[in-house]
Amino acid sequence: MAFAVYFFIGWISIICFFVQKKKLSVVENTVLFLCVLIVNLNWTWLIYEELGFITYSHDTWNFIAYLIKRSIIIPLIVLISLNFGRTDASLFKKLTHIIVSSLVILAVTSISHYLKVTTVKDWSILYDFSYYVALHIFGLLIHKWYQTYIVEKENEVLTR
Amino acid sequence: MIWIGKFDINEISLLIFTVAAYLFVVFSPKKLRREITCMSLLWGISTGIVYDFTIGGGLLDLYRENDTNHYEFFDLVYYALYGPFGYAFMYFYEVMKIRKRTFGYYIAGWALFGVLAQWLFTILHIITYQNNYSLPFAFPIFLFTQSVTGLFYHYVSTVYPNKKLMEKEKIQTE
């Protein structure tokens, strides 16, 4: 059951990203996806494996569902959020996108607790929400860094 | 979670490999644009991390990195070492002017090189196989990974340069 649900959510995430009108280039999107993926993998490893605040199911199909959520769904939802709206959107609008997107990921996380893919031991859903908001902000900061130190420097070389 | 563990052959060789690999990235003649270089390094690092946290840990736990199955500082150095591999893949793709006819040979060559590197890492105790995993299994994994990387880079290099050339022309006309 959990595998089917998460496969479907993963599929929807991919389709949404595919059809979305993107404001970032293919390389920008790849860089952001990979950065968010690296952070999310390390975070989940620390929380699940090293500190044991949350545990995952040892059933094979449930474990695959957990992998889909960790490696595909969460980074893609963050990426969809970062591509959403206009480049010159106000801070309030950007913050609204981040909060809505974090709530969506929180709902996906709640489903995993409900379907026993993951079991909470010593953790609060508020920590999860704070982490998801921080993950979005990290994405925005990486984008800012990328624009300043990678794209603009390359453009300087092009104009010479 | 431990800090370093026992500092011996695996840590020393990892430091040497990683420094040498990043020196290659810095001092090799520039063939890739800055954006692609950044993407290639991240691609390499994230590939290593995805495999380690998927088949190298969790339920499968097919191999151990460095001294323990837990997180340690030199695991990060190991992941960092994957970055230049990603860079080298895309760098030599351009240097050797890989096209459809040579694509298969290039991927197979990289897969063999990957297996060779894995073999070296097991000798140096950077990687220790467990749970019935052995070196031949690494070949299909590398073949798959390098194929995905090659196809993705082929896509990016056909879509992205056109946009950049247009930007360059636009800048020049201004």
Image: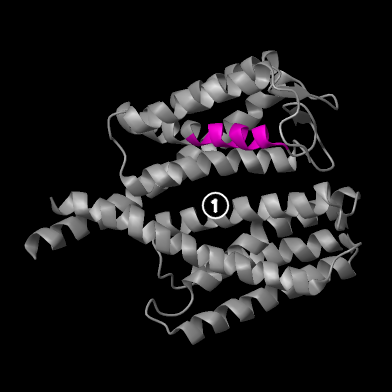
In the displayed structure, B163 sits above or below B43; it is below
Crowding at label 1, few (<14), some or many (≥20) Cα neighbours within 10 Å? many
Residue B41 in the figure: left or right of residue A154: right
In the displayed structure, B93 sits above or below A31; it is above
Q: Residue at x 68, y 50 (%)?
A: A42
The image quarter containing residue A106 is bottom right
Q: Residue furthest left?
A: B173
Q: Is residue B39 magenta?
A: no
Q: Is residue B74 magenta?
A: yes
* Magenta residues (range): B72-83
Q: Residue B103 appears at what percent x and percent y?
A: 42, 30
In the displayed structure, A108 sits above or below B59; it is below
Q: Residue at x 67, y 36 (%)?
A: B73
Q: Residue B9 appears at what percent x and percent y?
A: 66, 16
Determine the main secondary structure of the stretch shown in magenta.
helix
Disc 1 is placed on an element classified as helix
Query: Can the viewer see residue A111 in this picture?
Result: yes
The image quarter containing residue B127 is top right
Q: Which residue is mark 1?
A: A34
Q: Amino acid at mark 1?
A: Leu
Q: Quadrant of the N terminus of chain A?
A: bottom right
